[in-house]
Amino acid sequence: MIEDSLFDESMDENNMPDVNTSAPKESDSIPNTIAIDGPAASGKSTLGKRVADKLGYLFFDTGVMYRAITWVALQKQVDLEDESRVTHLAQHTALDIQSPSRDDGRQCDILADGVDITWEIRTPEVDRNVSLVSSYAGVREALTLQQRKIGERGQVVMMGRDIGTVVLPDADLKIYLDASAEVRAQRRHAEILKRGEKSDQDQVLEGMHKRDRFDSTRKIAPLKPAEDAIIINSDNLNEEQVLLQVLFLITQRSRHQE
Ligand code: DC
């Protein structure tokens, strides 16, 4: 149940088309499961977290699970081309996602077999290898099962590549957040610099193209919008404008279910 208006007074409703953006009434039925998919660095994470906070829902970024398995495999020096060994790791590593234990910019703690690997999974080495790991059928099967269980509890904003198509095909609202590779590379480059790390924008862009190709052409659960997803391109929209569009869609869905 939503207690406050979804729309802050500070939000600029002039960015919206001519729509009524008043908050849903308490009797309205807010979408219980919200799927957000899209390519790397399209702004899904910021959007998902803000929508979840507004609704008082759990925000679950499924990409961290694929990253965690990749990190564990690298750490254990498992040959990443060895699909059965990587799959075995995915089936036998206890992944846990908990509320943030530190105020260092993290959205949550990511634990693998009890070890905090929240920042380790964001390294360029993991970036380079995670697409391969996430293309393995057995890895996807093991992680999809866990994701679905969390989705079934409801009141969740789940983010990834295949949430609307495979993990939660019955999600109440499906958003596909897109942006050009150039804009996404610019954003990712700025993020890395902000963390105080070195970054080369051309290399980031090259990596982005490579990962897009891999993620969208893999045989199992490729990156693509679900047929009933609403596609938002954020090339010319700031975070606030994207959020406003999604809150509008939530309000609209709530009214249709009355
Ligand atoms: O969103 P991200 O960049 O942290 O995701 C890391 C990788 O995991 C990305 O290359 C695609 C993959 N992934 C996936 O295949 N399916 C998901 N539901 C989430 C992420």
Image (cartoon, grey):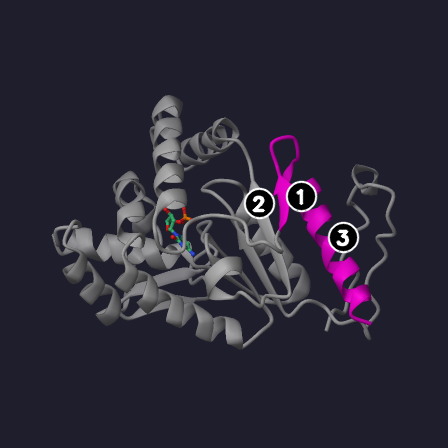
Q: Quadrant of residue 78?
A: bottom left
Residue topped by disc 2 = 177
Magenta region: which residues? 230-258
Residue topped by disc 3 = 248
Query: Dot 3: what SS?
Result: helix
Crowding around mark 2 (Cα neighbors within 10 Å: few <14, some 14 to 19, many 20+) is many
Residue pictured at 28% horizontal, 40% vertical: 128
Identity of the amino acid at label 1? Val
In the image, residue 95 sits, relative to residue 22, either above or below, namely: below
- The Cα–Cα distance between marks 1 and 2, rounded to whole angstroms, is 9 Å
Residue pictured at 63% horizontal, 43% vertical: 232
- Figure quadrant of the N terminus: bottom right
Query: Dot 2: what SS?
Result: strand
Q: Position of residue 38 (x, y in %)?
A: 51, 46
Q: Quadrant of residue 14?
A: top right
Which of the two discs, 2 and 3, labels the residue nearer the N terminus?
Answer: 2
Crowding around mark 1 (Cα neighbors within 10 Å: few <14, some 14 to 19, many 20+) is many
The secondary structure that dominates the magenta segment is helix
- Figure quadrant of the C terminus: bottom right
18 relative position to 190: left or right: right
Q: Position of residue 183 (x, y in %)?
A: 52, 29
Residue topped by disc 1 = 242
Mark 1 or 2, closer to the camera:
2
